[in-house]
Every structure is written in C-alpha cells, then in structure tokens.
Image: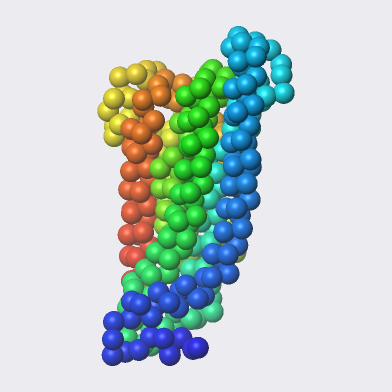
C-alpha cells in the first residue's frame, strides 16, 4: 500500500500514520526483540543459580561462602549478576539512539518526508508519530528486562549472596527505571541528530555519542542529588578522578563514590530521580529536534 493511500486528507491522520510507522518499523522491532531475548536468556538462567548459592552457604557457612573459593560462591554469583546487567545498563539507550537517528535521517535522504508533506500532514505529526513508535518499542522491550534483572538482584541482596563493596553497589543500584528513561533519552538524541544532520552515517555516529555525553554530564554533575534529597546528606566530597575522570559500568558512566554511599532503602529514590533527569534532558532534545524540524520545512 502506498504512503498516500494511508494518509487521507479528510480524516485525522494519527491512526493511519501510526499504522504506517508500525508497518515500516516492524523489521526493526523484530531485531530489537531478538536482542532483548538474548539479554533475557542469561538473566533467567542465572536466576536459577541462586538456589545453589543458598545451599552452598548453608553447607559451608556465611564466612566461607563470602571469602573462600567455591563453584557458586559470592564472587561467582556477583560476577554473573554484573555480567547480566552490563548488557542492559546502557546498551539499549545507545541502540535506541542509533535506530532513531538512522531512521530519521533516512526519512530525509529518501525524501519520503517530502511526499508526506504534500498530504495534509504537519511535519511535527509525521516525525512525532515515528519517534513515539521507536520510543514505545524500546520501552516495551526494555522494561521486562529491567524487571527480570531487578528480581534477580533483589533475591541476591535479600539473602546476602553478593560480595560487599563497590560491586554490590553497582549490581544493586544501577538497573531500574533510569535504565528505561535512558532509552527515551536515546530516542530523543537520535531524533535531534537525525533532523540536524539528515545524513545516515553522521546520525549513526553522532546519535549514540550525544546520548553518552548527556548521560556523562548527568552523572558527573551529580544533579541527582538536587532531586533525591534524602541522598544529599549522605554524600560528601568530590568525584574520584576529578571532573574528567569518568568511571564506567560497561558503557554507562558511573559515580562509584555516590553509589557506595547509598543504602538498600535508597534504591527507588535514586532510580526515580535519575530517571526524571534523563526524561528532562530527553524532553529538551525533543524540543530542539522539533524546533530544527520547523526550521527545515519553513
């Protein structure tokens, strides 16, 4: 079916535009689903290993479980959990940026947007539906992964099956609502870069770079402390390594000094504050993308 056949001028184009976007992006959604299943498989598999860890600790004692070497000891289980989280912490956000950036740039390169704008469709609506569709795909597929990981991490923490220290903090506090918010940030960054450059290869590189840079600024500035007030009184001093000394959990910029100061009850406050900041930056980038779009088609 042609583009003109699904965008009638006599009715609201929202539903036809949505159907068109879903049809055009179904292959992208299928590929993202396959990647999500690849991430979910080890999380589900490793969840079954907690029973072996509990049995081992009961057999050898808590001290030996945490400080001696066994097949399912604390170090092994922590390493598995961190490995599960490393492919989830920031890679979906980077992939979302690439997808949104490339698809947006392709709209300009193939001049499909020119054909669409000859219909009674505003550029804001045309691209807005597409960006919302990409964001929905990543949110819907990332959220179950986050829930699976959180359930596994919560089990290990509740039963004291992880090593204590920075690895515990990373495994406990990194994955959550902020992970989903970062995917929205990635889509917004891709939308802005794709609209600004209108070149596929430029968007392929610049979109994930902008997403990473935005996350790095949020982490290093510690703006989360201005949103999550209970955490503020617990953190003192400067970042280790100074302003430019970034730390990482896989591709995600991290602040280990901050994470190590958190307690179990700080999880939701820290995650919701981090997610709110990521969504605020995403809204700013989306506004910039729409403003650039209006300038392009003026």
Question: Which residue is at a point 29% across and 25% down the rendered structure image?
Answer: 230
Looking at the image, which is closer to me, 127 or 145?
145
Q: Is residue 80 left or right of residue 290?
A: right
Examine the rendered structure and indicate whether residue 84 appears above or below residue 260. below
Examine the rendered structure and indicate whether residue 58 appears above or below residue 242. above
* Residue 241 in view: no
Residue 201: image quadrant is bottom right
Question: Which residue is at a point 60% across and 62% down the rendered structure image?
Answer: 31
* Residue 18 in view: yes
What is the x, y in percent for residue 130?
43, 69
What is the x, y in percent for residue 262?
40, 23
Examine the rendered structure and indicate whether residue 126 appears above or below residue 72. below
Q: Quadrant of the C terminus?
A: bottom left
Examine the rendered structure and indicate whether residue 42 appears above or below residue 297. above
What is the x, y in percent for residue 107?
49, 74
What is the x, y in percent for residue 58?
60, 15
Looking at the image, which is closer to me, 29 or 192?
29
């Amino acid at each position: 079916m042609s583009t003109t056949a699904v965008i009638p001028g006599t009715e609201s184009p929202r539903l036809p535009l949505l159907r068109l976007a879903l049809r055009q992006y179904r292959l992208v959604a299928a590929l993202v689903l396959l990647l999500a299943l690849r991430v979910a498989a080890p999380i589900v598999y490793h969840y079954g290993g907690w029973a072996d860890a509990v049995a081992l600790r009961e057999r050898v004692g808590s001290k030996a479980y945490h400080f001696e070497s066994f097949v399912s000891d604390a170090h092994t289980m922590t390493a598995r959990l961190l490995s599960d989280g490393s492919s989830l912490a920031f890679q979906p956000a980077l992939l979302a940026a690439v997808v949104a950036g490339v698809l947006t740039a392709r709209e300009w390169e193939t001049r499909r947007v020119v054909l669409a704008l000859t219909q009674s469709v505003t550029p804001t609506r045309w691209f807005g539906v597409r960006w919302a569709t990409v964001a929905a795909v990543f949110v819907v597929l990332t959220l179950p992964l986050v829930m699976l990981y959180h359930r596994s991490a919560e089990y290990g923490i509740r039963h004291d099956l992880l090593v204590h220290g920075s690895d515990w903090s990373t495994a406990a506090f990194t994955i959550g609502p902020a992970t989903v918010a970062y995917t929205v940030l990635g889509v917004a960054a891709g939308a802005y870069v794709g609209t600004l450059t209108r070149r596929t290869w430029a968007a392929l590189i610049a979109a994930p770079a902008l997403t990473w840079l935005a996350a790095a600024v949020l982490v290093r500035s510690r703006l989360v402390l201005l949103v999550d007030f209970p955490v503020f009184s617990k953190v003192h001093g400067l970042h280790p390594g100074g302003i430019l000394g970034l730390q990482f959990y896989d591709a995600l910029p991290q602040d280990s000094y901050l994470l190590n100061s958190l307690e179990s009850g700080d999880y939701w406050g820290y995650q919701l504050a981090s997610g709110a900041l990521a969504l605020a930056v995403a809204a700013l980038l989306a506004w910039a993308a729409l403003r650039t779009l209006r300038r392009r088609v003026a």
